[in-house]
Amino acid sequence: MEHPKESTKAQLASCFKQLVITTNFERITIKMITDQAGVIRPTFYKHFQDKYEVIEWLFQQDIVAKVDIMLENHMERDAIHLLFICLYKDHEYYRHLYQLHGANSFEQLLGDYIYRSFLQLLDRLPTHPAEHLHHLTKPAIAHYYTFGLTGTIQMWLTSDQPASPNTMYDAYLYLAAHSAFDQPV
């Protein structure tokens, strides 16, 4: 059984998520969130500092906690597939979050998470994937893959009718495995 404090936190987050879909993020107030959740304003501050912390908590609950299990078990491809599935489940919410820009944006949060994940994956490899190219460091490689994946996700989620997560997963695997310079067979 869920602890009442956690269910209140989840209720606040759920109401916030609904508001993001229907209201411009900048116009969402703490009062709007608490009114929709049926609690008083101080209750919000028992759980979150601000709206950005709600975004981080939801991201942690809805994506990171699930995807990290796959990564910890060396199921990297399944982790990417699950990432697409989790994002698609609430694609309207995430599409609206992409309207935010800057240090506290969802785009930054997702990029930081994916970058850290790629760095961890590269650290598990027995050798450096491009050790003969000394300027091509693990952080540089992690950034390359981060930009590709986050750019793909942003284009996908901000489109009018996003493709299925399976389609995106297949497309991403194809793009990650093939160069634009490959000759058709």
Image (cartoon, helix red, strand yellow):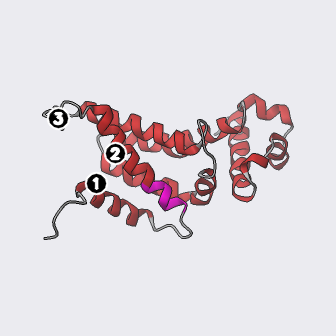
Residue carrying label 2: 145
Crowding at mark 2 (Cα within 10 Å: few <14, some 14-19, many 20+): some
Q: Judging from the image, what secondary structure is the residue with disc 3 in?
A: loop
Marks 1 and 2, the one that precedes in the sequence: 2
Q: Judging from the image, what secondary structure is the residue with disc 1 in?
A: helix
Tell me which amino acid carries mark 2. Tyr
Tell me which amino acid carries mark 3. Leu
Residue carrying label 3: 133
Residue in the image at 74% along x and 53% along y? 24
Crowding at mark 1 (Cα within 10 Å: few <14, some 14-19, many 20+): few
The image shows residue 45 at horizontal and vertical percentages of: 77, 30
Task: Name the quadrant of the C terminus.
Answer: bottom left
Structural distance between the alpha carbons of marks 1 and 2 = 8 Å
User: 10 or 125, which is in the foreground?
Assistant: 125
Tell me which amino acid carries mark 1. Ala
Residue in the image at 40% along x and 62% along y? 168
Residue stretch in magenta: 152-158
The image shows residue 1 at horizontal and vertical percentages of: 64, 40
Marks 1 and 3, the one that precedes in the sequence: 3
Residue carrying label 1: 176
Crowding at mark 3 (Cα within 10 Å: few <14, some 14-19, many 20+): few
Q: Are marks 1 and 2 in contact (CB under 8 Å)?
A: yes
Q: Judging from the image, what secondary structure is the residue with disc 2 in?
A: helix
